[in-house]
Amino acid sequence: MEFLIAAVSTPASFDASAATDAYIATMDAAARARSDAYFEGGYWLILVNLIAGLAMAGLLLQTGFSKGLRDRIHGLVRSKSLTVALYAAIYTIVTTVILFPLTLWQGYFREHAYGLSAMSLGGWLGEQAVGLVTGVIMAAIFLTIFYLVLRLARRAWWIWGAAVSVVLLAVAIFISPVYIDPLFNEYQPMEEGELRDDILALAEANGIPADNVYVFDVSRQSNRITANVNGLFGTTRIALSDTLIDNTDADEVLAVMGHEMGHYALNHLWEMFIIFAVVLAIGFAFTDRLFAFVNGRFGKSWGVSGISDIAGLPLLAACLSVYFFLATPVFNTVIRTNEAEADLFGLNAAREPDGFATAALRLASYRKIDPGAFEEFVFFDHPSGRARIAMSMQWKAGQLALGAEDQRPELRLDRARAISDALVNEPEDE
């Protein structure tokens, strides 16, 4: 360790690579092993969730449940759109119940086993219930519109379906800060003080239309740090978790907020709308072909007349899940690229490279810090901890070379070690 510290002791000899290694070397082996195990387990969960979803779709179709549900509802209401809405609501409830054992293990017991959840079982179940009610309402609305497009557009449904899906996503993002987010967390204006003033000054400098900062109580759910600049068409809101304020230093907070503001200033949301529309149109075209092939072989026994038949929703969902599974590296690369752009924006905006480096170490409690190149390409939707720390140190090296007065060559290794100690000494949940 001594040679690493020596290598970064003066501006003239600042070595970004050595500085990166010095930060990563502070992470305790036990904490790193636990983080790696948690994140690598997530790779298998992608496959497990796919298999569970396909098995559930086969169950609903093969037993005649889907066909019978459609027929009973349509016999009561006659309207196709109302049949879709009621089917969607019941389908959401039924699939949630079928997959609940996996959801319970994955979302509650596994999170507690790795010390990442602060929720009681009752609290977690309560949030699941709220999420189910919200999901039922949104599924009924979305699928009613979506199946109307299927019936009207016919062979071109995959193009119009992608367009409508993006519009509905925009509506969801628009209403989320006002109506959905408060269902899960309480949002309060941030206390006046230097940190709040600095965040608002950072926002003003980067063209973000906000006159307040909100704090939400993530600590009731987990110890993770998070923040966002969220909303559309006048609902834009700067928000950060209480865990970010309580568990980090001011330079880390500003580094994280600079990153989040980068997404807004770089128009990543609008960019993602366009990319998502293209990727989804391809996915719907893939689904159209796969649906036709599978339904051609089994559709008669399942009672599914075609892709616009709501009884075929389990098959439609299964085909889409196969597409998203195969496209995992593509989605992750698109998102990871945007995240890296926001990282660099945040460094230039907040000018806190060491704050960003130690924030990356904090995220390493549940994100593998140093994956292989192929592993990062396939499974990471954010840059790895090593990549983020390396970017921070490279940025710092450039500033030092330019003689920037607000940059110092010293690293925050004491804080980095304290972060590692906190991770390894976290009490295990029983």
Image: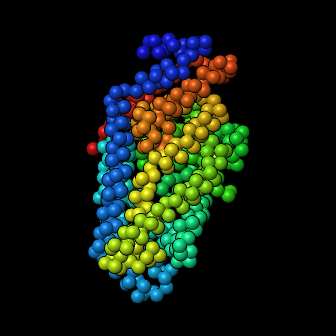
Query: Quarter holding the N terminus?
Result: top left
Quarter occupied by residue 37: top left
**Residue drawn 46% across and 22% down?**
21
Quarter occupied by residue 423: top left
157 relative position to 314: left or right: right
**Residue drawn 61% across and 55% down?**
274
49 relative position to 244: left or right: left
Place of residue 401 in the rendered image (x, y in percent of width and height, measured from the top left): 65, 18
Taking depth in this image into account, of 400 and 421 the one nearest to the observer is 400
Residue 114 seen by the camera: yes
User: In this picture, is 146 found above or below 269?
Assistant: below
**Residue drawn 45% across and 73% down?**
307
How many marks the image carries: the answer is 0
Quarter occupied by residue 179: bottom right
177 relative position to 91: left or right: right
Colour style of the rendered protein structure: rainbow
User: In this picture, is 402 found above or below 302?
Assistant: above
**Residue drawn 42% across and 48% down?**
221
Residue 414 seen by the camera: no
Place of residue 143 in the rendered image (x, y in percent of width and height, measured from the top left): 49, 71
Place of residue 33 in the rendered image (x, y in percent of width and height, measured from the top left): 33, 32
User: In this picture, is 70 found above or below 278?
Assistant: below
